Amino acid sequence: MKGIIFVLHGRREKLSKTNFSIIEEVAAQLENPSAIGLLEGEEQILEDAMEKMQTEKVEEIIFLPVLLFAATHVNEDLPTRAKKYLMDTPFSILPTLGTTEAVLNFVVEEISQKKEDSAVLLIAHGTPHYQEPYVQLSRIANEASLRSGRNIYPASYIGEGNYQDFLINHPEEFIVLPLFLTSGFLLNKIKTKTTEIHGDDDIWLPTLENQPALKAAIWERLKDAHVSSTN
């Protein structure tokens, strides 16, 4: 039997419960044993989840990163820690959620609900270490633009396509869609800086935090991996 580990970013200073309820709802419908493992912090960490799967005597572990784009955590930290802990237990790592149809649909639907004809700024976290996240974000922006008929620009908090540089060079008003899984400290920081550069006339759309689209993206990845539900 395969075991499923839902991998979340976590927080160094405390246990983050954001989006846990969605994952727990999905886990309750799985035929497979599952656990949540955090990449950062001291509680419910990745190794705890792997230990639980081994007590379940699973033959293989599937890691599902509940993250939008793959950077250092997914490309380096996760496989390194999995290899070190699991030893002879086979495992695989599913792609992150950003390139699912569910996330693309979320972007298109949120944008389409706005009657304003402003262009859209799609902001994700970004990374200075890998090119692929910005490439994937650009593809989402291009496809969502085709489907919605709006001009959509990709930007990153850090790394390629820095949002501050973009705002400085584009003084017009935007509809801003922050492509994040949470709505906490980092998003507030981005909003504050955006207001400093751009004024306060931009329209902000919600993140994916606790959205049905997040659950749909998780199921999409599980179905791609041929993981069945009890329904």
Image (spheres, rainbow, N blue to C red):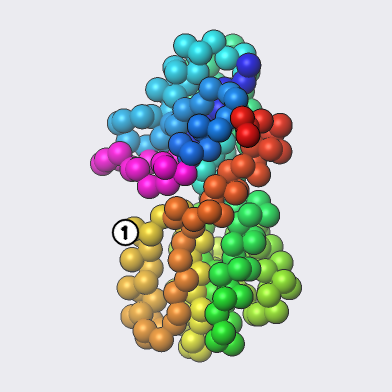
Viewer-proximal residue among 180 and 217: 217
Viewer-proximal residue among 39 and 147: 147
Q: Residue furthest right?
A: 146
Q: Looking at the image, can residue 79 be seen?
A: no
Q: Residue at x 32, y 73 (%)?
A: 192
Asked whether 12 falls inside the magenta stretch, the response is: yes
| Quadrant occupied by the N terminus | top right
Give the left or right position of residue 58, taking residue 36 as reference. Answer: right
Location of residue 119 (image quadrant): bottom right
Q: Residue at x 69, y 33 (%)?
A: 225
Say if 94 sits above or below 3 in the image: below
**Number of numbered markers:** 1
Percent coordinates x, y for residue 107 in the rendering: 59, 65
**Dominant SS type (magenta):** loop
Give the left or right position of residue 43, taking residue 127 as reference. Answer: left
- In magenta, the rendered stretch is 8-22
Percent coordinates x, y for residue 2 in the rendering: 62, 20
Q: Residue at x 55, y 33 (%)?
A: 29
Q: Looking at the image, can residue 105 be seen?
A: yes
Percent coordinates x, y for residue 204 in the rendering: 44, 74
Asked whether 80 falls inside the magenta stretch, the response is: no
Location of residue 219 (image quadrant): top right
Location of residue 61 (image quadrant): top right
Q: Residue at x 51, y 82 (%)?
A: 174
| Amino acid type of the residue that numbered disc 1 sits on in the rendered structure | Phe
Q: Secondary structure at mark 1?
A: helix
Give the residue pinned by disc 1: 185
Viewer-proximal residue among 109 and 73: 109
Q: Residue furthest front?
A: 231
Percent coordinates x, y for residue 32 in the rendering: 58, 23
| Quadrant occupied by the C terminus | top right
Please rate how many residues cluster around mark 1, counting C-alpha atoms within 10 Å: few if below 14, some from 14 to 19, many from 20: few
